Amino acid sequence: MKKFVLALSVAFCLLQGAQAQLKTPQPSPSAHIKQEFALSSVEVSYSRPAVRNRSIFGDLVPYGKVWRTGANGATTITFGEDVEFGGKKVAAGKYGLLTIPGASEWVVILTKQLDVTSPAAYKQDQDIARVTVRPETLPFSLESFMIGFDNIQATSMNMDIVWDKTVVTVPIKANIDGKIMAQISELEKGDKFPYFPAAMYYMENGKDLNKALGWLTKATEQNPSAFWVHHQRANCLAKLGKKADAIAAANKSIQLAKEAKNDDYVALNEKLLATLK
């Protein structure tokens, strides 16, 4: 009898061990997104619950209560450099990302707490920033909860929190001009100055176009067959009102682009020439 009981016990343990190894898909799969932004990146780790024919905001996710902004574990966001999050200054680092949904407004919270999975664990004195935003209604339903980034520019972008028919957006900005200008100033002292990227930064950020033109001219001298550089030089000349020189530069870019069999730049230069007639 003792041997029989022992055998049953061993069989039960073996069965439990086999069940423990069973792997099935997560009902709310985890996700990690990394968006290159400004001079670094922004990363978000969260999970993605699905609607599954349920009523979401104001029901499954109650209004007026702290929400972990996802499912399963806590949601976190990491900034690679100092930013403005919804107009609030936030230092580089990793933070918990929480929300308080509402029918007419949401509160988006950055907190020092990285492990909040229930309202009871949240401590408001650990807040880094609170941003109030208005939700918008989508003309369709998004089945899986999503956090993403949109309208990504050199120094600004939007973070979107989307689920079912609701989206809330928080603007993110980075002030990097001082850092880049300091880099350019330091690099000018050396003998390997990056003429093309420096000129493009000047052109795209409303700085000295004459200086940008000088750098673009240097860049074409370094790489005479670079049709894309000749095209940007034509753009710069056009911005300076030097129409004849811009036309000549655009035609040179077309010639080089045709030799390289690059139809895209042929078309870009033709569009520029059309504005210079």
Image (tube, rainbow, N blue to C red):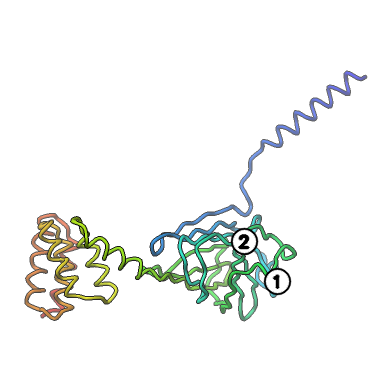
Whether residue 139 is visible: no
Q: Residue at position x 59%, y 69% from top?
A: 128
Q: Is residue 29 left or right of residue 201?
A: right
Q: Is residue 106 left or right of residue 18?
A: left
Picture layout, residue 181 above or below residue 29: below
Q: For the N terminus, which image quadrant?
A: top right
Find residue 8 and report its image quarter: top right
Rendered residue at 51%/75% (across/down)? 86
Amino acid carrying mark 1 in the image: Lys
**Quadrant for the C terminus in the image:** bottom left
Residue bearing the label numbered 2: 70
Residue pictured at 64% horizontal, 40% vertical: 23
* 2 and 1 marks in contact (CB < 8 Å): no
Q: Is residue 69 left or right of residue 193?
A: right
Q: Position of residue 239 (x, y in %)?
A: 18, 78
> How many numbered circles are shown?
2
Q: Where is residue 42 drawn, in percent x and y? A: 47, 61
Farthest right residue?
1
Q: Secondary structure at mark 1?
A: loop
Q: Secondary structure at mark 2?
A: loop
Q: Residue 65 — which label?
A: 1
Residue 184 placed where, x, y %?
A: 27, 64
Q: Is residue 38 left or right of residue 25?
A: left
Q: Residue furthest front?
A: 189
Q: Earlier in the sequence, mark 2 or mark 1?
A: 1
| Residue 104 visible in the snapshot | yes
Residue 59, position in %: x, y?
Answer: 70, 70
